[in-house]
Image: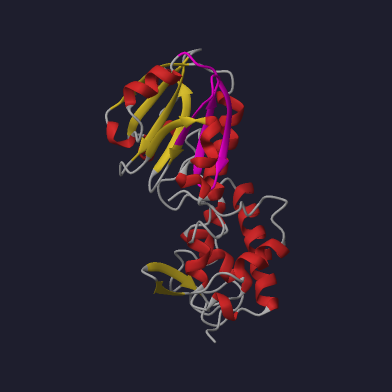
Amino acid sequence: MPELPEVQTIVSDLKRKLKGHVITKIWTDWPKSFFSFLPQIKKSIIGKKIIGVRRRAKNILIDFAGGKTMLIHLKMTGHLLYRDKAWRKKVTRNHPFHDSYNQYIRTVFYLDKSKELAFSDLRRFGEIMLFDTRRENELKRLKSLGPEPLDPQFDFSRFQKLASKKKGRVKSVLLNQSFISGIGNIYADEILWEAKIHPKTKMELLSRKQQTDLFRAIKKILKAAVKHRGTSVSDYRDAGGKKGGYQKIIKVYQRKDEPCYRCHTLIKKIKVNNRGTNFCPHCQKEK
């Protein structure tokens, strides 16, 4: 599933490209992805100017003139592509748009100026919904989210207060979107390796030093992943159809039986609350 760095990469791309565009038509072969009544969505946003694109956790929010916002959640395999309507005639066969993972188009938002925003979603789990922008804080799926970890106002003091209220294995707590938003399986593994904390360690038993190391690792790993435009270990692609680059420097995720970059111990994989979890048994000792 695309996590904070992947969604932020797509949002950063679309923020530059979509603003000022107008949706002229909507096509889909998978209406189940729309959590709002599709005819009502068409009536509400076709002909309306896009005034902004932003992110909340793993959600993409597209704001329209007239007070409507469209939420897109990419789920397991979704990503958005911004391209020319006649892109097949304009790009060579080795262009990223020809990548097989960019071919599972379920929905197309046709734009003015001969452009389109296409939603590729292999497994069809993606979600699209429309709501009144002014009622955003009332939307259940958004108001239950924890703070943004890369927000400058999210400091160690705030992190420590939140951590003091959570119990359970630290890996599971990191995946809890009501604790901190945007972290998924890839970056939880990377963060814990960076902080040298075993994934089964109880959150309530972390020392102050471990809390500090964990907080710093969250910031460091997510910033690096955004800088490298996300991780493409399978189907994630950016708005131009290209792969991210963080998989080239990944430390533990999907590296089972490969040597740790710090101590050369072989990486192990276990289950933590039914989630595959990669860690170094030497650097991340279980206590």
**Residue at 55 percent of width and 43 percent of height:** 56
Is 118 covered by the magenta stretch? Answer: no
Residue that extends furthest to the bottom in the rendered view of this protein: 287
Residue 125 visible here: yes
Q: Position of residue 190 (x, y in %)?
A: 55, 64
Q: Which residue is drawn at 53% across and 56% down?
A: 183
The answer to whether 211 appears left or right of 130 in the picture is right
Location of residue 212 with respect to 45 vertically, above or below = below
Can residue 230 be seen in the rendering of this structure?
no
Q: Give the range drawn in magenta.
A: 47-71
Residue 154 quadrant:
bottom right
Q: Picture coordinates of residue 283 (x, y %)?
A: 58, 79
Q: Name above or below for residue 92 compared with residue 186.
A: above
Describe residue 16's horizontal placement relative to residue 253 as left or right.
right
Q: Which of 157 and 55 is in front in this view?
A: 157
Name the residue located 55 percent from the left edge and 60 percent from the top edge: 179
Closest to the observer: 237 or 23? 23
Q: How many marks?
A: 0
Residue 97, percent from left and from top: 43, 31
Quadrant including the C terminus? bottom right
- Whether 66 is drawn above or below 267: the answer is above
Q: How is the protein colored in the picture?
A: secondary structure
Whether residue 51 is in magenta: the answer is yes
- Horizontally, residue 113 falls left or right of residue 106, namely right
Q: Is residue 117 above or below residue 125?
A: above
Q: Is the magenta stretch mostly helix, strand or loop?
A: strand
Where residue 210 sits in the image (x, y, percent)? 65, 76
